[in-house]
């Protein structure tokens, strides 16, 4: 497959247009010099539509489009639980987490940990997140993106990887979060339109003259096992998605950690104009998440019928793109590039934010504008410069390590979920305790975080070690639930055994209200009803 001249023109027009738009929204008023609040928090002025679109653009990238479509090819619709359960999680984040974060003027997740527990855990978790973001998340985004670009455009994969990383860096380096968030509505619109086009055409090809709906019915008849939402224990992919535990077990831990306590995601809501705007933004994102399986998973399932002998599942989505006619191929390819660039730029900005505000500024003892409106402008210029340097270093490291880390994997999406699951339970423990249990201490939080890694590592041993069956046989979603409760118990025990001084907790609940507007409540009810209908239909 290769791009025609018309397709190339479409892609080039997109690239020039989105880059120009990013630079335009990055401009500052005459006489105003960009400070840390502008660069890392978009001047705390994001509207709801930018928050919602940016949440999805940051989340949906190559690891979702290519990786989740590949899992749809291998596993089926059950993988859509990651998307549909995320919609429900966003409601929880909007109602119970954001009021506390915004009332306490939180701008990074490590900062929350310091204000709630103490400085040690802030530094430990900041370093950890930097390592995870660079060597797991950022590498996976540009690696899976380069696979798609290579298969569609015929470009050398290393060239594609470097090109994607460099474009994403330049796209956001001037404006920071503002450049990313205020252009993401364009990226998401293109992503949704492109995804719907490829879903429509793949189903139309299966349905023939009978049309797209007949194609969907035919697909469910041809591969009925790919439309089981809840996998049975005898399913070969049960270890990836262990039945009912997907709905009531470890996936909740992964979703709460990702959507509620992940700097890369929550940074958009922290930059909202107000709590009301942030809550409308997460509702908007929740509705978009309901649509994502149609855009991402369905083409992968269709590929089982249209391209049954792929060498690797992750080739499913790029292969389905080959069905597109000239012009539309360029549009859908531009949509794929949009998702990759938006997510990569978001990740780069979050890495720069954590490094600059949680590592560099603390080491230098600099009071940032994000923390204090009286921060010195000289320090602000320095912080913005450090953030830009950190962004450059992060993408270079990701480019150099992507192939060694991910080059031999068949389903990179599942790998990312499992590897992240080492630390996800501990992160969820320390934030839930920090938010809702006043007696939690820094010592307890540190023990919970360390226990998460140690216990997960015990589960990581090969299924048989020295001829003895090990805990590796436990599905990783169930493993996360088990590790969560172990880490929670240890964190509570240590917190009770070593109580902290009352003044060590700087997070206040004064002025925090969990009441939501009628509009929020109605929209939330609609999302819940849709989810019930979806699972009832495909159980």
Image (tube, grey):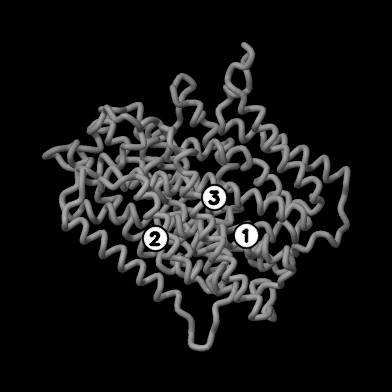
Q: Residue at x 77, y 42 (%)?
A: 447
Mark 2: secondary structure: helix
Relative to 165, residue 471 above or below: above
Picture disc at residue 446: none
Relative to 539, residue 437 above or below: below
State which quadrant residue 503 falls in.
bottom right
Q: Position of residue 505 (x, y in %)?
A: 80, 60
In the picture, the quarter occupied by the N terminus is: top left
Q: Residue furthest bottom?
A: 31
Q: Is residue 37 something that shows in the picture? A: yes
Q: Position of residue 224 (x, y in %)?
A: 32, 27
Q: Residue under label 1, please give it.
A: 355
Q: Residue under label 3, please give it.
A: 134
**C-alpha distance separating marks 1 and 3:** 12 Å
Q: Report crowding for label 1: few under 14, some 14 to 19, many 20 or more residues within 10 A (C-alpha).
A: many
Image marks 1 and 3: residues in contact by CB distance under 8 Å: no
* Horizontal side of residue 514 vs 219, given as left or right: right
Q: Position of residue 461 (x, y in %)?
A: 62, 24
Judging depth in this view, the residue of 38 and 172 nearest the camera is 172
Judging depth in this view, the residue of 530 and 420 nearest the camera is 420
Judging depth in this view, the residue of 76 and 353 nearest the camera is 353
Q: Report crowding for label 2: few under 14, some 14 to 19, many 20 or more residues within 10 A (C-alpha).
A: some
Q: Residue under label 2, please give it.
A: 167
Judging depth in this view, the residue of 399 and 244 nearest the camera is 399
């Amino acid at each position: 497959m290769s791009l025609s001249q018309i397709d190339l023109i479409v892609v080039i027009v997109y690239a020039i247009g989105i880059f120009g738009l990013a630079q335009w929204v990055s401009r500052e008023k005459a006489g105003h010099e960009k400070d840390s609040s502008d660069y890392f928090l978009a001047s705390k002025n994001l509207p709801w539509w930018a928050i919602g679109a940016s949440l999805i653009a940051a989340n949906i990238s190559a690891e979702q489009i290519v990786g989740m479509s590949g899992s749809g090819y291998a596993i089926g619709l059950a993988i859509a639980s990651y998307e549909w359960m995320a919609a429900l999680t966003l409601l929880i984040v909007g109602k119970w987490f954001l009021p506390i974060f915004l009332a306490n003027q939180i701008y990074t997740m490590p900062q929350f940990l310091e204000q709630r527990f103490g400085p040690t855990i802030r530094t430990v978790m900041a370093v950890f997140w930097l390592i995870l973001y660079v060597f797991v998340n950022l590498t996976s985004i540009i690696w899976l993106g380069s696979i798609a670009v290579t298969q569609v455009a015929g470009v050398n994969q290393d060239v594609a990887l470097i090109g994607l990383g460099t474009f994403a860096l330049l796209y956001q380096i001037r404006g920071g979060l503002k450049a990313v968030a205020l252009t993401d509505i364009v990226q998401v619109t293109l992503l949704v339109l492109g995804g719907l086009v490829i879903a429509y055409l793949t189903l139309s090809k299966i349905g023939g003259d009978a049309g797209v709906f007949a194609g969907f019915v035919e697909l469910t008849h041809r591969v009925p096992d790919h439309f089981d939402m809840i996998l049975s224990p005898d399913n070969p992919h049960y270890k990836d998605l262990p039945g009912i535990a997907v709905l009531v077990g470890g996936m909740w831990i992964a979703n709460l950690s990702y959507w509620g306590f992940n700097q890369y995601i929550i940074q958009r809501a922290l930059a909202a104009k107000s709590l009301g705007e942030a809550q409308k933004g997460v509702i908007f994102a929740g509705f978009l998440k309901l649509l994502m399986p149609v855009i991402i998973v369905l083409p992968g399932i269709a590929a089982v019928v249209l391209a049954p002998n792929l060498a690797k599942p992750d080739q499913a989505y790029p292969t389905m793109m080959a069905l597109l006619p000239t012009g539309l191929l360029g549009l859908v390819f531009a949509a794929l590039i949009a998702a990759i660039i938006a997510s990569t730029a978001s990740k780069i900005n979050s890495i720069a934010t954590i490094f600059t505000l949680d590592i560099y500024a603390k080491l230098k003892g600099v009071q940032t504008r994000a923390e204090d409106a009286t921060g010195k402008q000289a320090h602000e210029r320095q912080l913005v410069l450090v953030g830009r340097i950190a962004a450059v270093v992060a993408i270079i490291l990701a480019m150099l390590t992507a192939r060694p880390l991910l080059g031999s994997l068949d389903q990179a999406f599942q790998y990312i979920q499992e590897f992240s699951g080492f630390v996800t339970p501990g992160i969820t423990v320390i934030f839930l305790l920090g938010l809702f249990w006043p007696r939690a201490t820094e010592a307890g939080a540190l023990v919970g975080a360390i226990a998460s890694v140690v216990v997960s590592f015990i589960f990581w041993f090969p299924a048989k070690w020295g001829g003895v069956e090990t805990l590796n046989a436990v599905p990783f979603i169930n493993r996360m639930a088990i590790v969560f409760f172990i880490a929670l118990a240890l964190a509570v025990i240590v917190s009770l055994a070593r109580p902290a001084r009352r003044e060590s907790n700087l997070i206040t609940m004064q002025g925090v209200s969990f009441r939501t507007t009628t509009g929020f409540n109605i929209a939330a009810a609609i999302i819940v009803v849709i989810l019930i209908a979806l699972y009832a239909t495909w159980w």
